[in-house]
Amino acid sequence: MKKIEAIIKPFKLEAIKDALNDMNVLGMTVMEVKGFGQQKGHTELYRGAEYQINFVPKVKVEIVAAEDNVELIVETIIRIAKTGKVGDGKIFISPVDDVVRIRTGERSSSAI
């Protein structure tokens, strides 16, 4: 099993959710996050004054999936989230040693 963490632009979330639902991805966790990468934030104008925004709002999507589904999920996220501009986001893939469903005590892939 692998954990896929995708940091994306907020307006791409619905399209990614719909595409993953179509692929029968059984669940995901979504969080609103802030951060910066190469773009180092940006400047906004508010009531005639400029403000430096150091942390850009993003969405973090976490998915735990069987290893044989990971590449398809990652390719789908890239295809939908990519705009070709700075700030499109990143995807992190990590191993998952075990999963336990709290309600039933099921473990491993049957708990996903």
Image: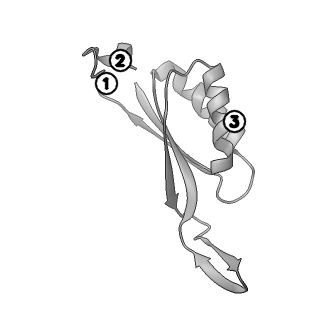
Q: Quadrant of residue 66?
A: top left
**Residue flagged by tag 2: what amino acid is it?**
Ala
Label 3 sits on what residue type? Ala
The residue lying furthest to the bottom in this view is 49
Q: Residue 64: x, y in percent?
A: 44, 29
In the rendered structure, are the residues bearing label 1 and label 2 in contact, judged by CB atoms less than 8 Å apart?
Answer: yes
In this view, the residue in front, 36 or 33, is 33
Question: Mark 3 or 1, which is nearer the eye?
Answer: 3
* Identity, as a three-letter code, of the amino acid under mark 1: Val
* CA–CA distance in space, label 1 to label 2: 6 Å
Upstream in sequence: badge 1 or badge 2: 1
In terms of sequence position, does the residue under pointer 3 or pointer 2 come before the other?
3
Q: Cα distance, mark 3 to mark 2?
A: 26 Å
For residue 108, above or below residue 51: above
Image coords of residue 111 (percent x, y): 35, 17
Marks 3 and 1, how far apart at CA: 27 Å
Element under disc 1:
loop
Q: Earlier in the sequence, mark 3 or mark 1?
A: 3
**Label 3, on which residue?**
15
* Residue located beneath label 1 in the image: 99
Image x and y of residue 88, in percent: 65, 52
Name the residue tied to disc 2: 111
